[in-house]
Amino acid sequence: MKEISKSGKQAYWRLALESFRAHQTQAKAYLDSIARMDEAQIEKMALSDDGWAETQRFVLGKSLVGGSVTGDIFENITPGAIPFVRLDVPPEPAKPEVAVELAGPWSFYLEFRRAHGLMHLAHPEPPEIALQEGSTLVIPLWVRNLSPASREVTLSVELPAGWAVQSGAGEFAVAARQVAAARVEINLPMLGNAAPKKPEAQEVTVRAQSNGQSIGVVKLRVELRKRALPQ
């Protein structure tokens, strides 16, 4: 990231920062602070602990033109089209009639990995997210009832100290042979002045029961930061 781009004539971290400055709706306060800096101050900030000059790492998930783990990121890519290759997608594992599972982007990327033959890639378990202090964590859920009768489902939430459920916990009904969308919203605390420089992720657990039996447990690791993009 500290090397100079042959086409852009600037360090790669500078090109990345300039691109990020277009995201006014996501980090306006941060970008306004950069706008008040001169070039020397920006460089000092970027090369210190703000991450702009950190090494960027990529994982070779698959290649339709062949490639090596340590090769150039565009290895074997040449002008012109290549033949379409349809992957053999493994079938989705069988699911119980009544169950709860994490939805939203986590569900999407699970389906994405299966559809694109990327199930071999490592991914965090439990799933993770980083959020800004004092904001709201939204945990989207799929509640599946494929049985022939309506089912009452109860959601309960286990939280770190100082965190609070805003909505979503409690009982609700899911009709027969339906998949219902639910969401648990959690108020996140402020970190305060004593916040660690590298905060540790905290675990949130959502438990679902029906007819007195567990139908699923959803866990999510949440890292609170002074500054983070909106969920």
Image: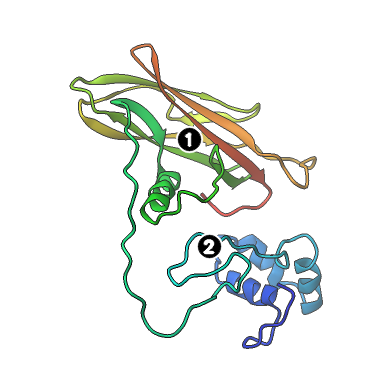
The residue at which mark 2 appears reads as: 25
Measured from the top left, where is residue 67 in percent x and y? 53, 70
Residue placed farthest to the top in the image? 212
Front position in the image: 223 or 166: 223
Q: Quadrant of residue 107?
A: top left
Measured from the top left, where is residue 79 in percent x and y? 43, 85
Q: How far separated are the C-alphas under marks 1 and 2? A: 22 Å
Q: Earlier in the sequence, mark 1 or mark 2?
A: 2
**Which residue is painted at 63% across and 67% down in the image?**
70
Measured from the top left, where is residue 146 in percent x and y? 24, 28
Measured from the top left, where is residue 99 in percent x and y? 35, 27
Quadrant of the frame with the N terminus = bottom right
Relative to 45, say whether 114 is above or below. Answer: above
Residue 133 visible in the snapshot = no
Relative to 7, say whether 152 is above or below. Answer: above
The three-letter amino acid code for the residue at tag 1 is Glu
Q: Quadrant of residue 54?
A: bottom right
Classify mark 2: helix, strand or loop: loop
Front position in the image: 39 or 153: 153
Relative to 72, say whether 149 is above or below. Answer: above
Q: Is residue 167 left or right of residue 26?
A: left
Classify mark 1: helix, strand or loop: strand
The residue at which mark 1 appears reads as: 185
The three-letter amino acid code for the residue at tag 2 is Thr
